[in-house]
Structures are given as structure tokens and as C-alpha cells.
Image (tube, rainbow, N blue to C red):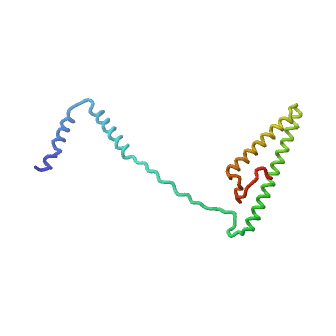
Amino acid sequence: MRIRSRFNAAGGIADFWNEWKKPTPHRWPILAASFLMTGTLFFWLTKEEYYYPPEVPQVTYITTFAEGRTDEEIRQSNLENQALKEERQAERERIEQRRRDIYKAIGAATGVDVDAMEAEAEAERAAEEQAERERLEGLFGGRDGNSGEQIDPDGE
């Protein structure tokens, strides 16, 4: 038996044409709905979104230190930076002391117990310093982070 004779589409097309020629009132709306559903399905299936991976960023390293510095130059740079840091810290403390003096003057002018407030603020500062000392001791285990030498948290 030949495959071509078993799958001949002529009979199916003839049946479709006989049904299509019959006058039915809903022929065009049904055909439109069929095309709409099929078209929507094909559109949804064939729509492809592809996102390109982001480009690898170009990293440029900038250094402010000259290559080949000697240990003495590094040490001198560290000393200069430490002096600048201490100068800034001293200025910050001077500004904070000035602010405290202004608040004391305002408090004294308004009749507030300035001495009690100052003692309370000093206790808070001492507690913060103690907490910071304990935090550092917990991080370094009682040792200086740079040299590995034992440090005294009280500075003695």
C-alpha cells in the first residue's frame, strides 16, 4: 500500500469547502476569533527577549605613591600624615571645647544646672572611650595591630 494514497488531503479540503459554502451567520466572527487566538499564541511563542551581558568594566588603578620608595621615605610620609592627623584632632577638640563653653554659658544664663550636665556628658564620653578600647582589644587580642606588641589599654 502506498503512503501517498493513505494521506491524501483532497478529501479533507473538499469537506472543508462544503462546510464553508454553507450560509452560517457566525462564520466571520468565528474565523476572526480563530485567527486572533492563533496569532496571539504565535506572537507570544515567537517573541524572544535576549539581554546581552554587561560589558566588563575597564579598571584604571591610580596610585599617589611613587614606585621604588625607600623605607625612610615611607617612614617620613607616615610621620607627616600622623602629624597632620594629630593637628586635625587637636583642632576638633578645640572646637568641641569651645562649643561646650558656649553651651555652659547659655545654660548658666537660663538657670540650668550646668555642672550636673557636664558630669553626665563626661561620664558618657568615658563610657564611649572604654567601649572603643574594649572593641579594639577584642579585635587585636590585647596586641597592637601593626607590630604585634602587647599594648596597655590605659596608655601607661
**Residue at x 72%, y 58% (from the top left corner):** 149
Give 23 or 132, whichever is nearer the viewer: 132
Left/right placement of residue 71 relative to residue 16 reads right
Is residue 22 depicted above or below 45 in this figure? above
> On the image, which quarter does residue 68 sit in?
bottom right
Left/right placement of residue 135 relative to residue 97 reads left
**Residue at x 75%, y 43% (from the top left corner):** 128
Give 142 or 82, whichever is nearer the viewer: 142
Is residue 132 depicted above or below 31 in this figure? below
**Residue at x 77%, y 58% (from the top left corner):** 82
Instruction: Return the x and y of residue 23 as percentages of the image width and height.
Output: 22, 31
Give 81 or 24, whichever is nearer the viewer: 81
> Count of labels shown?
0
> On the image, which quarter does residue 73 sit in?
bottom right
Instruction: Return the x and y of residue 99 as percentages of the image width and height.
Output: 83, 42
**Residue at x 80%, y 53% (from the top left corner):** 156
Left/right placement of residue 11 relative to residue 144 reads left
Instruction: Return the x and y of residue 153 as percentages of the image width and height.
Output: 76, 50
Left/right placement of residue 52 relative to residue 138 reads left
Residue, far left: 1
